[in-house]
Image (cartoon, rainbow, N blue to C red):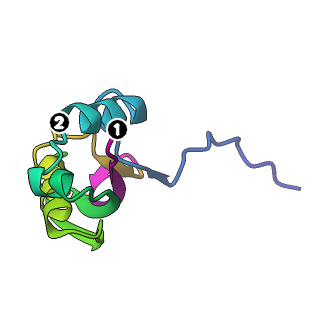
Amino acid sequence: MVKRPKQKFEPYMQMPDFPGGQDALAEYLSANVKYPKIAQENSIQGRVIVQFVVAKDGKIENVEVVRTGGDPSLDREAVRVIKSMPRWQPGKQRGKPVRVKYTVPVNFRLQ
C-alpha cells in the first residue's frame, strides 16, 4: 500500500468581499442610498435585486437590475449606489484573482 503525503486542503473558490465584510456592506448601503423623492412622495417601497461583476482588480462592472423594486426611480438609485462602491477584495480561484458575478438586494423602506 502506497501512502500519499497529506495535502493541505484549499477551497476551490474564494468569493469576493466588500472592504470590511458583509456588515460593512450593509452599513455602506444604508449610509449611501438616497431615497428617491418621487418614490417617497408616492409612498413607494421595495427591494431591488442588483447583480454585478467584481473584476480581477476589485472594480465593480456590468451592474444590472435583475428584479425591480416596483418603480424605475428605486432601480436607478440602487444601480447608482452599487456603481459608487469602493473596490472589493476580488474573488480567487486556486489563489489567482478571477471575475465573479455577485448579487445584492437594496431595500427601500419608508419610516
Kindly identify the residue that appears in the image at 15 percent across and 47 percent down: 81
Q: Which residue is mark 2?
A: 32
Label 1 crowd (10 A; few <14 / some 14-19 / many >=20): few
Of callouts 2 and 1, which one flags the residue occurring earlier in the amino acid sequence? 2
Image coordinates for residue 80, horizontal then vertical, percent:
10, 53
Image coordinates for residue 89, horizontal then vertical, percent:
27, 39
Q: Is residue 55 visible?
A: no
Q: Is residue 110 magenta?
A: yes
Q: Is residue 20 visible?
A: yes
Of 85 and 68, the residue lying toward us: 68
Of 53 and 11, the residue lying toward us: 53
Q: Which residue is mark 1?
A: 111
Q: Where does the magenta region start and end? A: 95-111
Of 95 and 16, the residue lying toward us: 16
Q: Is residue 83 above or below residue 53?
A: above
Relative side of 35 to 29, left or right? left
Front: mark 2 or 1: 1
Kindly identify the residue that appears in the image at 35 percent across and 40 percent down: 17
Position of the C terminus by quadrant: top left
**Quarter location, residue 76:** bottom left
Q: Amino acid at mark 2?
A: Asn
Kindly identify the residue that appears in the image at 70 percent across and 41 percent down: 6
Specify the principal SS of the magenta part: strand
Label 2 crowd (10 A; few <14 / some 14-19 / many >=20): some
